[in-house]
Image (cartoon, helix red, strand yellow):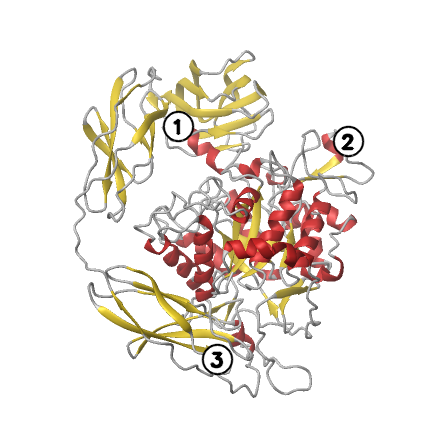
Amino acid sequence: MNLLRRRPPLAVLTAVVACLLAAAPAVVAPPAAARVAPTAGQAPAAASPAGSGTAAAVPAKDWLHTQGNQIVDANGDKVWLTGTNWFGFNATERVFHGLWSGNITEITRSMAERGINIVRVPVSTQLLLEWRSGQATVPSAVNTYANPELKGLTSLGVFDHWLDLCEQYGIKVMLDVHSAEADNSGHIHPVWWKGAVTTEQFYTAWEWVTARYKDDDTIVAMDVKNEPHGKQTESPRAKWDGSTDQDNFKYACQTAGRRILAVNPNVLVLCEGIEIYPKAGRSWSSQTEGDYHFNWWGGNLRGAKDHPVDLGSQQDQLVYSPHDYGPLVFQQPWFQGEWNRTTLERDVWDPNWLYLHKENISPLLMGEWGGFLDNGPNQKWMTALRDLIAERRIHQTFWCLNPNSGDTGGLLLNDWKTWDEAKYALLKPTLWQSGGKFVSLDHQVRLGGSTATTGISLGDLYGDQPPAGDEQAPSAPAGLVATARTSTSVTLGWTASTDNVAVTGYDVYRGTTKVATVTTPGHTDTGLTPATAYSYTVRARDAAGNTSSASSALSVTTQTGGTTDTTPPGVPSGLVSTGRTASSVGLRWNAAGDEPGGSGLASYSVLRDGVAVGTATGTTYTDTGLSASTAYSYTVRARDVAGNTSAASAPLVVSTSAAGGNGTLLSQGKNAWASSSESGATSPDRAVDGDGSTRWSSTFQDNQWINVDLGSRRTVTRVVLDWEAAYAKGYRVQVTDDPAFATWTDLHSTTTGDGGTDTLDVSGTGRYVRVLGQTRATPYGVSLYEFQVYGQ
């Protein structure tokens, strides 16, 4: 993801895409012979072509290709892609999640300093098509007070700005089409076409984004489609065979890969697996479950042995990319009974994907793996897979950076700034290190940036040298301008310099002091004094160390500080209730606006019966600790950074539901887990959080369950089930003390459930309480807003 190069205007790109696609692919020189990279802690051996006695020239670009089960650079030196996922561009927000509070520069720099050398970025086909047609909009999920550098940028502008940051800090990027539509739960859809998004548009979107960034070696890999899946009885579903059928993902990935490589023959093409594959002697026409091998969505690559993806003359750009998860995501059969790394490798990993690495067929990149640390089975699985990845140097992007992943949590905590040190410690052995330093995939830029002390570049690792005999300096940067300024910062831009070999960076001077070295034509100088004039110049440099003459000087005066914002923000509108229980009310409203040039929106104050009861930075809030069967009046006020407060919204009156009664509420906030979850946004903890606007939802099948651990043996006297529209018609409420969950005692059972809220007076004792949804009332799964257990 690292090339700090300004992108051409969108209109120009769109106009030339057809020409680019029609052009013959560039001829690529054959790679140099491979050399073995030092393992963590080893000093790098001298890297030289055979018989030369001198170090290999540093590649002009950072493109990668494959040799057997390894990924190598243009010199044939082995590299190790080790990173994480940062989602949001795939969702309805159409931008990285977390920018509502975290700063994009700080987050990116911290990833680089912690050893993340590649970031997998989920997007949607719909978003790429919107960008292609010039319909990119300014995302509302960006807090411009926390991210002043993003003010006024569209989602495409934010992405391009982030690519510049990646180049600055030595990070590379992988794009991943996560779903057809821009939807937070879009990955639930099993295939790459949906609604208005056709298979051909899927290919077109890939061609467009490849053409836009074809000269930018920040983006080095394209993950064609996230987690194609579907079972034998479901339609549509993804299969893998030798046909050209629309639902054959092998053919879709092969077709997309060839069309991508026709535009840019240098990027890696990643093909994930599917969910099921027929057993020997069985065919895809079978509807019998026992005729198939099952695995995680995207994790079944058994078909690659029988029907390998064929990229023709560019087969050395292919990487297979499985996904793997632990028992907290789903209690797979291989997590039943006694299991360990040996059984996982023998029964699951080897037959589904590890054979590709062991038999030297292809590199593997574990595109998603990760989860909560439970000091139990999930952590046991994560440690086992971590050790396999580290020992065999399997490429990986950990799921995920985001703390708001309901299935797994993230590397960052909820403030989008603090790292989960325990989880990072588990991940760290799978991050590429040499001599105690993290290794970048960039030949010039250290991981962490030019001043980093924690990272090195590929050039540092392999001793690459610039081409000999280059004594020609780059041209002087031209067109130096200030593109933005505040009272304490100035943002500069200029026209890129040219060189006989390649420009590798720019030195930015404030007066006679060098304040930054960057690799793209732009920089934001911070920490300045209000109402003060500063003079700037820029010099370009190349790999041989030649430096250009200085650009023309530019004088910029910072804005006057201390201007007082006395105008309150707009009034929040559209206040509604998103759900209610006997003790809580969920609220949602439309975002308020602040005046142009104002200090920016800071938060909202929620008032109950005229008294402030809470503060929210977003547009939702759950009020808890309420009395049952009681009416409450709510209003919301907006507050800006300067402290100005808006008038109150129109009032909303909400009555809580009837009491659960019959004892103390025992289940709220306790540990809950389930047979499955429809998505990270509908994880089982949502059913015991006391928030009537959130819910647990299973996948779309019968016999789904949710368990709650009461913490100790309790007498259960009442269970309240607040069903969503997808309810169970036949279900059982059960209790047990058995930690192996082998035996359960029924507290209640029915085959005539009708949804709504079921208040069940029961009698039983045990530590664990389960709702087993045996038959669904709708084609969807079973879903509960709240699962409340009362007793003593």
Q: In the rendered structure, are the residues bearing label 3 and label 2 in contact, judged by CB atoms less than 8 Å apart?
A: no
Q: Is 22 in front, or is 327? A: 22
**Mark 3 vs mark 2: which is more N-terminal?**
2
Residue at the spot 32% in from the left edge and 54% down from the top edge: 148
- Left/right placement of residue 565 relative to residue 587 reads left
Q: Is 116 in front, or is 360? A: 116
Using the numbered discs, state the Cα–Cα distance from disc 3 to disc 2 in whole angstroms: 65 Å
Depth check, mark 3 against mark 2: the one in front is 3
Q: Amino acid at mark 3?
A: Pro
Instruction: Locate residue 178, reporting x and y percent.
Output: 56, 44
Residue bearing mark 3: 474
Residue bearing mark 2: 286
Instruction: Locate residue 216, reporting x and y percent.
Output: 54, 63
Residue 346 versus residue 48 in the image, above or below: above
Using the numbered discs, state the Cα–Cα distance from disc 2 to disc 1 in whole angstroms: 41 Å
Residue at the spot 71% in from the left edge and 72% down from the top edge: 30
**Mark 3 vs mark 1: which is more N-terminal?**
3
Q: Is residue 496 visible?
A: yes
**Mark 2 vs mark 1: which is more N-terminal?**
2
Q: Is 409 in front, or is 569? A: 569
Dividing the image into 4 quarters, which one contains the C terminus? top left
Q: Which image quarter: residue 650?
A: top left
Q: Amino acid at mark 1?
A: Ser
Residue bearing mark 1: 693
